[in-house]
Amino acid sequence: MSHSNTCVSQASKDFRASQETLVDIFERIERFFRRLETYTGVPPTPEMTHIIIQIMVEVLSILGIATDEITQGRTSE
């Protein structure tokens, strides 16, 4: 296999892995929002407000990690 074929093959594997990672991230965010939807159907108690805030913090954390990974991937190219 030539060097260019090896590079294309590796790039393809990296792209697939990135896609799988993004799908995983969006699935996790979806689960958080499904949980959030459950809590927003009733008037919030202080405890529920705390849980809703925790869910939103987790979503923001996941988005921050994803952004960092994408940024690092672009800079390493």
Image (spheres, grey):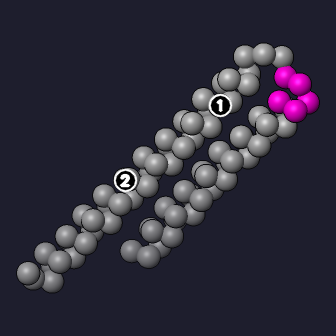
Residue pictured at 65% horizontal, 31% vertical: 35
Residue 69 horizontal side relative to residue 18, left or right: right
Q: Residue at x 57, y 41 (%)?
A: 29
Task: Name above or below for residue 3 compared with residue 58.
Answer: below
What's the residue at 44%, 68% (across, down)? 74
Is residue 31 depicted above or below 38 in this figure? below
Crowding at mark 1 (Cα within 10 Å: few <14, some 14-19, many 20+): some
What residue is disc 2 on?
19
Q: Could you tell me what secondary structure mostly forms the magenta stretch?
A: helix
Of tags 2 and 1, the one toward the viewer is 1
Dot 2 lies on which element? helix
Q: Residue furthest bottom?
A: 3
Amino acid residing under circle 1: Arg
22 relative to 36 in the view: left or right: left
Check disc 2 and give the amino acid type.
Gln
Task: Please provide percent x and percent y for residue 53.
Answer: 79, 39
Question: In the rendered structure, which disc, 2 or 1, sits on the residue that comes first in sequence?
Answer: 2
Q: Is the Cβ of the residue at disc 2 closer than 8 Å to that at disc 1?
A: no
Read off the magenta span: 44-48
Q: Nearer the viewer, residue 75 or 48?
A: 48
Q: In whole angstroms, how far apart are the C-alphas of marks 2 and 1?
A: 25 Å
**Label 1: element kind:** helix
- The residue under label 1 is 35
Q: Quadrant of residue 2?
A: bottom left
